[in-house]
Amino acid sequence: MMKSLIVILICIAGIFLLINLIGVLNERYACKGVASWYGEECRGKKTASGEVYNPDKFTAAHRRLPFGTLVRVTNLENECEVTVRINDRGPYIRRRIIDLSLAAARQLGIVEKGLARVEIDIIMRP
């Protein structure tokens, strides 16, 4: 009885993981939420991908998208767009969907405000 319950729970968890993975890998993946940015304080530190962070490059952190994924980020308040490459993990604050490099934040016009409502769309998977 206990073994069959464990097997069922594992199967359910596997199905949820598969659904999540399909959504992440789908080229039509789009998501709206809040973007934040990080800058000079992280310059020279290693990202989760092992790459050294450079705030002058158009990069970003995302919780699940594979490293190397190119993503178009659109500021929903001013319609500015930027293309970034995912090279880090985060953000780790609830309701935020992407952390942008300083260069990307400048392009979107969110440096002073710090946060913005954005939409992200996958352009190219690695």
Image (spheres, rainbow, N blue to C red):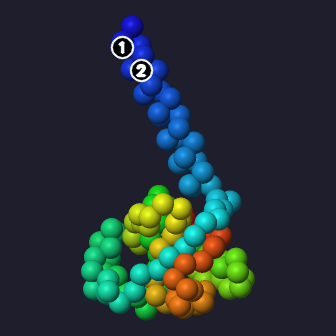
Q: Quadrant of residue 116?
A: bottom right
Residue identified by numbered label 2: 7
| Residue beneath the point at 70% across and 77% down | 76
Q: CA distance from mark 2 to mark 1?
A: 6 Å
Query: How many labels sit on residues?
Result: 2
Q: Quadrant of residue 56?
A: bottom left
Eyeballing the image, is 17 above or below 84?
above
| Residue beneath the point at 70% across and 81% down | 77
Q: Is residue 70 visible?
A: no
Tell whether label 1 touches label 2 (CB within 8 Å). yes
Name the spot of residue 57 as percent of width and height, x first: 45, 88
Of helix, strand and loop, which one carries label 1?
helix
Name the spot of residue 39 as percent of width and height, x first: 40, 86
Eyeballing the image, is 13 above or below 81?
above
Name the spot of residue 84 as percent of width and height, x first: 53, 78
Q: Is residue 82 visible?
A: yes
Name the spot of residue 109 as percent of width and height, x first: 60, 89
Residue identified by numbered label 1: 3
| Residue beneath the point at 57% across and 70% down | 34
* Left or right: 27 in relation to 16: right
Residue type pointed to by label 2: Val
| Residue beneath the point at 57% across and 42% down | 19
